[in-house]
Image (spheres, grey):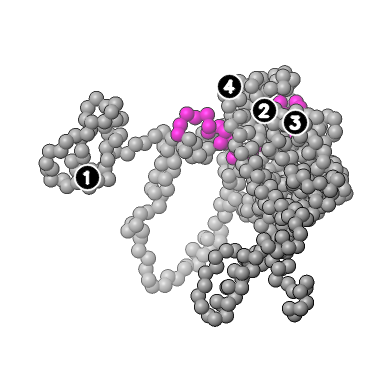
Amino acid sequence: MSPTSALTVSTYRTPRSPSPRKISVQLFGFDRPIPFPKNSIPAPAVVTPLLVDALRRVNARSILSPGIGQRPRQSVAPRSKSKDTKQAKQKTPSAAGPSLWKTLISSGKGVIAETMDRDRDPATPYCATMLTPQMLREGLYTEEASYHAQVAVKNAIENRSHKEWKIDSILSEAMENYTVALGVELMEAVAGPHFTFVDPRNHDDARAMVRQALRLMRLFAKHGYRRDRIIISIPATEAGVEAAKKLERTHFVRTNLLYVSGLTHAAICAEAGASFVMYSYAALSHGIAQRTPTNPFARIVEALIPSTKRLADEAVESTAEYFRAQNIKTTVLLSGIHSLNEAQRLKNFDSVVLNANQSCQAKVPMAAVPPARTRPPVERSPGKTRAREAQSAASLLASGAFLSAMPAETREIASDTLAQGLKESMEWMHKTCIHILEHLQAEAQLAHIDDKALEECYEEDVNEQFRISVLYATGAPFEQRIRVRARDVGFRMLCSMWDRPETL
């Protein structure tokens, strides 16, 4: 397409009659001037290969559904259904098959609960529970989880060393107490293993992740839960793999490495001794889409097109095939699915993580979907073909910097997948910490400030409340100028008369 046609403006509706001669515009970088449009005929649309698949789907839907004015008219008179029609409808078999949950259970796969919802159907039990940074943040909006957060802050303040107010250390302990409290709630509802996690902001510090994992294990032990029920989720970075190796081989703590990107990456995690590797389907699809040199805004669409999904499916399937062929005990988990069809299409994972909405949808009968890919003969399957890449997993793990030692394409996908997963989890952790920090700072202020100074902080609130009360009593319209903190301790102390009996 020439630059002239690319810059033609078709939104200005000029008359079709001949127009007077106008001066052309000369733009820098073009050999010839660009004339003004002489009519209102729209310029041809610019179609990129990126949107071909999406346009094909839209056109297919428009062809199948009749347009406006093309639908057949329905008679107003009531129609009586014949008996033959009723019997035919009753005998017509339903196109929907069994629910996804029954399909998974019958094939020996488990469903891991990624939800705090207590209204669970005992007929479809979960095999395990999982806590994520997003659940920490969203739990603060519920009454029960918010109570656990307040108790966590209180305990962290009471247990501070030498009664010093080190906000950073108290905040870290409060976050760990809050994490363990929600984990205990989940384990009381589901009799199975529990996946907790270390702070993803320490993804590049192996020692910090090991120390935090051991602290979490001690906190769970205080609540009466042994380490065989606790699994520590760690990002599958170079430091994360090193931390998992230390925890598995030295402290006998089971680990789950997150945001795995492919067979080579998964083989390195298994070589380190990780009990579980988890594919985040959303993060993996995003990482695969990043390697396409297109507009960054279009990569969101690329993560959903069939070619990207096919590569993500092959990564999960080839890993499971390789682990099975090599008799590797590491379990393959699947999370971050966009729809239940992805879990139904894949066959070789061991367990899938579902949130509350997906769990409800998984209990509804679903139509059958084709498998992820046609399995070739065993001697030429992708699992055995790509197994040659994983033969050097031990050498890559021994080098320490395995990401830099990977092939270029594999390294880029691994880096983009980890970056996407860590970005989301760190954002949720930051929001949770800000919320807990506000409560902690309020407690610290109450501990250090005297009564009169505390009351002075709420004089403006009391005056505003008095002004609003007077206007409301007279029926005059009013507008609140500031938010009155009527529930705070300082406000209640200033309004009370317990220290001024002469005014009573």
Name the residue beneath numbered marker 4.
408
Distance between the Cα atoms at labels 3 and 4?
A: 25 Å
Q: Whole-percent x and y of residue 325?
A: 72, 26
Q: Residue 443: give its label.
A: none
Amino acid type shown at disc 2: His
Mark 2 / mark 3, whichever is N-terminal: 3
Q: Nearer the viewer, mark 3 or mark 4?
A: 3
Name the residue beneath numbered marker 3.
206
- Foreground residue, 185 or 106? 185
Q: Residue 40: give its label.
A: 1
Distance between the Cα atoms at labels 1 and 2?
A: 56 Å
- Foreground residue, 314 or 467? 467
Q: Is residue 30 above or below residue 433?
A: above
Amino acid type shown at disc 1: Ser
Name the residue beneath numbered marker 2.
265
Distance between the Cα atoms at labels 1 and 4?
A: 50 Å
The magenta stretch is: 268-295
